[in-house]
Each structure stands twice: as C-alpha cells, then as structure tokens.
Image: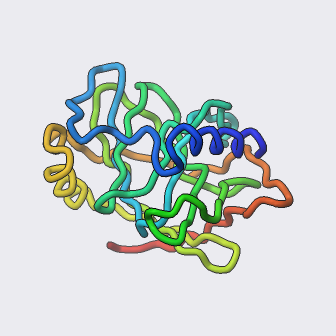
Amino acid sequence: MLRQLACLMVSFICTGCTSMGRADTKIEAPDKNQSIFVIGLTPENHRIGVFGGSEKDGRFKQNWLPAVLYGGAQGGYIVGKAHAGATLAITAVQVTENEKSVVGTDFQACNGAKTVVFQVPPGKVIYLGSVDYHVDGKSLEVRYWNDLDGARRYLSGAYPAIADRVEQGSYRLLPTDLTCEQNTTVYVPVYIPTSR
C-alpha cells in the first residue's frame, strides 16, 4: 500500500494534481505498439488512477511505476493510451469536492477488493465500459455499464480522428494484491448491476 501511495503522490506532483496520461484530443490512430482506451466515468469530481502490473493466481499485482493514467472525466469520459500487451487496473479513486479541487478522499482497491483489470491489445481504440462511483459512509459503491454508442458520440466531438475506430473492449473484475494500511481510507466496492 505504501508503494501505491508513493506512486500516486508522484503522479500528483508531476501533474499539478489534476491529470496525468490523458490522451491529447488531436491524437491519431494508434500504431501496433500501443492502444487508446476509453472509460466512462461519473461523477466528474471523481478521479481514477490506472496502474500497470500483472496478473498472478487470479489477482492483479500492481507494479511500482507511476500511474499510466490519473485524472477525472471530461464530458463523462477519460481517454488514455498505453503500450500493447500491458495489464492495467483501476486501483485508486480520489473523490474531491468538485472537479477543480486538488485535495480529496482517496479510496484504494485493497485487501481483496475487486476492480477493473484489462489487457491492452495492439493498435486498437477500445471502450472498456463506464463506471459510476458513489461514496456511502466509508465505502465506495461502484456501478458498471456499457454504452459504446455514447462513447462513440463523445469521441466524435472530442477526439474526431479516432471516433470511427472505437470498438468494445473487455475487462475482468479481479482482486488486487494491495494491502490496506491502518490510516488509509479503504476501497470497499459495493457492486450494483445497472441496465443503462
């Protein structure tokens, strides 16, 4: 957990605390060595940390590197890019007072909590799905759904060069190998199926 918090802090310092790794809106289609991924994210005062790692024994093992993507949604979506073959996961969520705040409450996917884990395919633009977070006391409720058409509409306005290439990607919900520290807010997901 200390390793992840240190990585998250480096991410904050390097980016002025608001975003890191977000794809530029003028990005072109990816080559075979990378892919672009799209995640729907609500509400807008929530930021996610997508970290690299590996899967071992049915668990996501986070590496020590800084976040591949850290930030909040713009227009309901966040767009990042990563190297083909990478295994990535959302292991951190920060809830702030509003989308411009730099300080907030941090939630971590730890002590066996399941989170979104995905493989980065070569040369694709993938929409993984959408996630909605809601703080309920000291836990974080998480709702997942798919809306590929909504993602395509968003990309048409914000990332027109890649909008026609987006396709449905996939993810799995896996536990992480991260342990929760005593003084850290714990990410206790409550999975609520939705039919959006």
Q: Is residue 134 left or right of residue 82?
A: right
What x and y, as percent, mark residue 66? Answer: 59, 34
Q: Quadrant of residue 31?
A: top left
Vertical placement of 114 versus 125: above or below? Answer: below
State the image coordinates of residue 148 (x, y, percent, origin top left). Answer: 25, 56
Q: Quadrant of residue 28?
A: top left
State the residue at coordinates (63%, 38%). Answer: 10
Residue 54 at x, y percent in the picture: 61, 32
**Vertical placement of residue 196 versus 29, above or below:** below
Q: Is residue 35 above or below residue 48?
A: above
| Image point (40%, 46%), residue name | 170
Task: Check the image and name the residue furthest to the bottom.
Answer: 137
In front of the other: 65 or 116: 65
Which residue is farthest right? 182
Q: Position of residue 13 (x, y in %)?
A: 59, 41
Residue placed at 66% from the left, 54% from the top? 109
* Residue 93 drawn above or below residue 19: below
Q: Quadrant of the C terminus?
A: bottom left
Q: How many marks are shown on the rendered structure?
A: 0
Residue beneath the point at 72% across and 53% down: 110
